[in-house]
Amino acid sequence: MSHQPSSAAGSPTATPARRGTRYRLEPPKTAKGRRTIPLPDVLVATALREHRVRQVAERLAAGAAWQDWDLVFCTTIGTRSTPGTSPVPSRTCSSGRALPKIRFHDLRHSAATFIVVQGVDPRTIMETLEHSQIAITMNTYTRVLPVMQRDAADRMDAVLSVGAVPGS
């Protein structure tokens, strides 16, 4: 039996929605859900283009079984992904080191933490992830990494070092 995409599936603003035990694509719940998010150039130039090449190969391999839902991330036959089938595009980073197996949604947590490490302010991160409160972003989506703890200790050391105390 072939499942045809809903009208929302062809739209770049369709989002997965869980209804009981089933998932389907629906328009975003709010107008704010229809937005453009700037992506890092390296992600667009490298990772997404490589992913697209793999997806075209999957499409050719699937043949008549392919269902064109116009999705960036989908199953090997083009249908929408669910939590159990969501692919993480790459299991290796640019240095060639293996990454741990994670859920697709975990990428949001990783991205939030990486952006914090880069010094981006919490409000910008909150709005990028479309959270309603900074507390959700900072308490749920970010982690304190050892490099962050080292940076805090180094900054405190600079303040406490002789001659480095502001106003002295």
Image: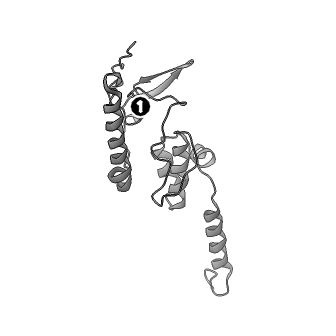
Q: Position of residue 138 (x, y in %)?
A: 59, 49
**Residue denoted by label 1:** 76
In the rendered structure, the answer to whether residue 42 lies left or right of residue 18 reads: left
Coloring scheme used:
one colour
Q: Is residue 29 visible to the viewer in this orientation of the structure? A: no
Q: Position of residue 75 (x, y in %)?
A: 43, 30
**55 vs 117: above or below:** above
Q: Residue at x 54, y 31 (%)?
A: 83
* Other residues around mark 1 within 10 Å, as few (<14) / some (14–19) / many (≥20): many
Q: Is residue 162 visible to the viewer in this orientation of the structure? A: yes
User: Front-most of 156 and 17?
Assistant: 17
Q: Position of residue 96 (x, y in %)?
A: 48, 58
Looking at the image, how many numbered discs can be counted on the residues?
A: 1
Residue type marked 1? Thr
User: Front-most of 89 and 156?
Assistant: 89
Pick out the residue farthest to the top: 1
**158 vs 86: above or below:** below
Q: Position of residue 16 (x, y in %)?
A: 46, 28
Q: Residue at x 36, y 41 (%)?
A: 54
User: Front-most of 35 and 57?
Assistant: 57
Placement of the N terminus among the 4 image quadrants:
top left
Placement of the C terminus among the 4 image quadrants:
bottom right
SS for callout 1: loop
In the rendered structure, the answer to whether residue 126 lies left or right of residue 40 reads: right
**146 vs 11: above or below:** below
Q: Residue at x 49, y 52 (%)?
A: 92
Q: Residue at x 47, y 61 (%)?
A: 95
